Image: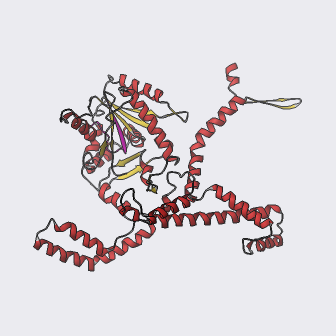
Amino acid sequence: MAEAHQAVAFQFAITDEGISLHFDREAVKSALRSYFRGHGKKILRLRAAIYSGVFPASPVSLVVILALVTGLWLAGYDLSLGVFPALLSLARWIGYSGTYLTIIFLLSYSIFLWTLFSYLQQFTLKLLLMYKGFMFEPRGKPSLVTQLWFKSVQIVTGRQRPQLYSYQRSLPRLPVPRLKDTCRRYLQSARALLNDDEYREMEGLVKDFQEGPGKKMNAYLYLKSWWANNYVTDWWEQYVYLHGRSSIMINSNYYACDNSGFSLTSLPAARAGLICHIQARLKDKIETERLAPLVSNGIPLCSAQFERTFGTTRIPGIEADKLVHRPGAASNHVVVYKSGRWYCISLYHKKKLLTPVDLEWTMEQIMEDSDAELRPGEEHLAALTAADRKSWAEMREKYFMTGVNRTSMEILEKAAFMIMFDDLEPSLYVENGDNTALTQYCKSLFHGNGYTRWFDKSVSVIIYKNGKLGINAEHCW
């Protein structure tokens, strides 16, 4: 009972002298820490959204504008062009008066000017980023115009540190090429593939298209380009990727190799624990926008694809697949595949990220558990993701929509990423011109044996017996 009483943060008693209140400071601090851990990410996301929304302006500029507006108002200068006095007179006529009303007006007007200032900066930066002259100049020898342009970009962006998506509102739209230029480039590319008679026929078809339906289609593209930052992205995702009905195993997915020259450890459990910790931290930085944006030689690039790196799965459909992204706490776990068995590991304990050592210990328990009895169908479950998309969609609809199968499938699809242990011991070196071992390693990353990779997951990390690793990634996101 003594321990139970010590765990209580607040205690009160009613006596003849009134209510007596006692509280444990350490318990209160612990409760506050728990609260801020739980709501910290929400606060960081809100802060990041505000910073990115006004970039390259900053909250500091709001303070400067507020001080300037207040100072000029006190000095007798009215920046509102008569709006302030009129509103104050109206408020007094209604019955409201006092210093608080003046403060509200000054603050509101300062926020209005700050918002206008931030939009002006964003528009100026967008105009500057439309310049493409630097792309056609010799490397390391920029022209005077390019140097002046680069300095202008630096002046507009200022010295503040941008968030991951800070530049998104200032990036120029993808321009729609002229129909005439598109048709000319098409004929140039087709000339090498056609004989003279076929080419003349193609010229006639292109001319008919250019003078007929091509004009209307290009007009639609112009219209779409006004409300979409990139008029082709959603169509490309839908019709090049998600509408494809063949297997994505080697037709869409790609792989990436490990560092060939250096490895911290040859223990697979240790590498798995470390990569889980690093990936979880990267996921958190992406979701709170604390990751630095993509910048090449001072030129900001689009960072939109970072958003779906983790917690994303391609869901099969009869006619078309769909890409489902689950951010935040919904994807704070990983799924591990080892020797035909599937495991789920939480990356957090009491909303605190587990250390690499904790995760390594968990991986060791999984590796020691590999002698347990296999459940029917468990070992070859991932082979479904290697099938053609229509067959996989039909199987999913038939067998994974109810009961424990549905629960298991949701755990798989909501995972931040996957860890796949493999018994192969690959070599990343080419010795005496023999690249057989390297080829075997690349094939293993690309497709495995067909049922040891979950091809629908955005990122799957493959850990080998000798501690080497690599990734297999779904391409659509």
Q: Is residue 355 visible?
A: yes
Q: Quadrant of residue 98?
A: bottom right
Tell me what residue is drawn at x 25 percent, y 35 percent: 441
Magenta-span inclusion, residue 110: no
User: Observer-nearest residue: 14 or 311?
Assistant: 311
User: Observer-nearest residue: 65 or 394?
Assistant: 65
Tell me what residue is drawn at x 29 percent, y 53 percent: 318
Tell me what residue is drawn at x 73 percent, y 73 percent: 83
Q: Which residues are magenta?
A: 451-464
Q: Residue 43: give x, y in percent of width and height.
A: 60, 47
For the N terminus, the image quarter is top right
Q: Is residue 330 visible?
A: no
Q: Residue 139: give x, y in percent of width and height.
A: 37, 57
Q: Residue 267: give x, y in percent of width and height.
A: 36, 25
In the rendered view, would you say 427 is above or below 122?
above
User: Observer-nearest residue: 409 or 149?
Assistant: 149
- Residue at the extreme top of the image, as rendered: 2
In the rendered view, would you say 126 is above or below 30?
below
Magenta-span inclusion, residue 462: yes
Q: Residue 104: give x, y in percent of width and height.
A: 75, 62
Q: Quadrant of residue 224?
A: bottom left
- Is 107 situated left or right of 294 in this image? right
Q: Quadrant of residue 445?
A: top left
Q: How many marks?
A: 0
- Is 200 situated left or right of 105 in this image? left
Colouring scheme applied when the structure was drawn: secondary structure
